[in-house]
Amino acid sequence: MTTTTIRYFAGVREAVGVASEQLELPATLRTLGEARAWLAQRDARHAAALGAERTLRMACDQVMADADAPLRHGGEIAFFPPVTGG
């Protein structure tokens, strides 16, 4: 069993209701975009936060990435709005 850490920041965190999750993602997921789509279908909160209509930045293992970036199972994925305050 390989768990992946999913982190949510700013408005995404508020919409989902948690700052992070440890999940076993389906082995069929190959890209960051596929992982985002899978997460969005989990429930209404995830759909509102991660749906395709939302503009989001993504990172894989703390490196900015786009939807076509390869997914590394067991790593870390992060989602956040395009502009975050500090």
Image (spheres, helix red, strand yellow):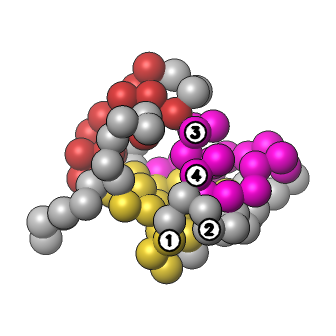
- Where does label 4 land, which residue? 33
Give the mark nearer the N terminus: 3 vs 2. Answer: 3
Residue segment shown in magenta: 20-39
Question: How far apart, in angstroms, are the residues tagged by discs 1 and 3?
Answer: 15 Å
x%, y% of residue 5? 59, 58
User: Mark 2 belongs to which amino acid?
Assistant: Ala
Of marks 1 and 3, which one's residue comes earlier in the chain?
Answer: 3
Mark before the other along the chain sequence, 4 or 2:
4
Q: Is label 4 in contact with label 3 (beta carbons under 8 Å)? A: yes
Image spot of residue 66 (x, y percent): 50, 65
User: In the rendered image, which residue does mark 2 sit on?
Assistant: 69
* For the residues bearing labels 1 and 3, Cβ distance under 8 angstroms: no
Q: Amino acid at mark 3?
A: Ala
Position of residue 54 in the picture relative to residue 66 (left or right): left
Mark pair 4, 3: CA separation: 6 Å
Q: Which residue is mark 1?
A: 65
Q: Secondary structure at mark 1?
A: strand
Q: Secondary structure at mark 4?
A: helix
Element at label 2:
loop
Mark 4–mark 2 Cα distance, whole angstroms, equals 8 Å
Q: Residues within 10 Å of mark 3 (few under 14, many from 20)?
A: some
Mark 4: amino acid: Gly
Does 50 sit above or below residue 69? above
Few, some or many C-alpha atoms within 10 Å of disc 4 (few <14, some 14-19, many ≥20)?
some
Q: Which quadrant of the view contains residue 3? A: bottom right
Q: Residue at x 27, y 40 (%)?
A: 14
Q: Residue at 63% x, 48% y: name it.
A: 35
The answer to whether mark 4 and mark 2 are in CB contact below 8 A is no
Q: On screen, 78 above or below 10? A: below
CA–CA distance in space, label 1 to label 2 = 6 Å
Q: CA distance from mark 3 to mark 2?
A: 14 Å
